[in-house]
Amino acid sequence: MKIICEITGGLGNQMFQYACGKAIAYRLSAKFLLDLSLLKYSNRTFMLDTFPNIRSVQKYKPSHDSAGFKKIFQRVLQGLGIRYCQHIQEPHYSYWPEIENIQNSVRLSGYWQNEKYFLKISSLIKQDFVFPNFSCTEAEAIAQKIRQSSCSVSIHIRRGDYVQNLAINQVHGICSMEYYEKALQIIVDKNNESLPEIFLFSDDPKWIKSNFNTKGFPFVIIDIPQHKSAPYHDMHLMSLCRHHIIANSSFSWWGAWLSARDGIIVAPKRWFKEETMRQYNPSLPSWITI
């Protein structure tokens, strides 16, 4: 029996896909394989092998049979009572409970952005997503500063393709400055004995320098050149913070989820801009959504 998980998108998406597939494989004691074939049709690269504990996971090499032949072959196997690898496409962006009914080999397609898919093995997922050492002394110095802060606040401002690509913008949209101001005030109000130290993360740090209002609190804009080719270091720094104000982005979702500190996590109530998708939100019940 095998569980094949298609990998696509950026680092945060790949982590969700991996976690979902790993949970099914663990439940069924099945072989777990990652299919990287979709990445060649995008500008994305496989990033999960940056986690030392994941490098040994096997890669699946799909055959080049035509789709029509595969369907015929599967029908023949069904007629003979032989199990085959069923293909499951994620039906929507909310948790799909039918995934618990999987008992045989499957190939998973989708994003699977919900903690419920891997909640039962969350401790194993956290072991798999242990970050490698930082690539430069600048990052290590910031990490030390975060560790020493009693009220460190990670703030993620996602821009990039959310702003530059019209089609993506119409689906996702970007979080407003009003959202960030309200979120920061919530953390300030709940930590009235400690002033927040803000650590700003963004794929557009120049915009942050000119436009983000830190309300006079001490702040650091994370703008480390080495991290452009290794963004998992930014996620690592995020995870070291105590409190988190995340964007509607799987990247900062994981930065907050992997944090070992007992802090406040604020997330946008509306994850998607697209009207037909507004009911979908991967935030945890313990998080504050505004």
Image (cartoon, helix red, strand yellow):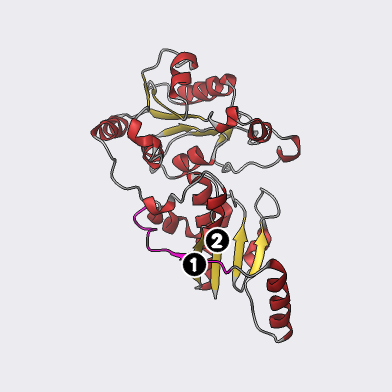
On residue 137, the disc is none
Residue type at mark 1: give it.
Answer: Phe
On residue 32, the disc is 1
Seen at 69% across and 82% down, the residue is 77
Answer whether residue 61 is magenta in the image: yes
Q: Nearer the viewer, residue 242 or 279?
A: 279
Q: Which quadrant of the figure contains the C terminus?
A: top right
For the stretch drawn in magenta, the main secondary structure is loop
Query: Where residue 216 appears, x then y in whole percent?
Result: 41, 12
Q: Nearer the viewer, residue 82 or 250?
A: 82
Above or below 23: residue 255: above
**Contact (Cβ within 8 Å) of mark 1 with mark 2:** yes
Seen at 53% across and 23% down, the residue is 180
Query: Where residue 262 appears, x then y in whole percent?
Result: 41, 39
Secondary structure of the residue carrying numbered label 1: strand
Residue type at mark 2: give it.
Answer: Cys
On residue 5, the disc is 2
* Magenta span: 51-63
Q: Determine if residue 261 is in view.
A: no
Number of numbered discs on residues: 2
Residue furthest left as drawn: 137
Seen at 57% across and 56% down, the residue is 117
Q: Residues within 10 Å of mark 1 (few under 14, many from 20)?
A: many
Query: Where residue 131 appears, x then y in whole percent?
Result: 35, 47
Query: Where residue 164 appears, x then y in whole percent?
Result: 59, 28
Q: Nearer the viewer, residue 169 or 131?
A: 169
Of labels 1 and 2, earlier in sequence is 2
Above or below 113: residue 256: above
- The Cα atoms of the two marked residues, 1 and 2, are separated by 8 Å
Q: Nearer the viewer, residue 281 or 43?
A: 43
Please indicate whether residue 237 sits to the left or right of residue 9 in the image. Answer: left
Secondary structure of the residue carrying numbered label 2: strand
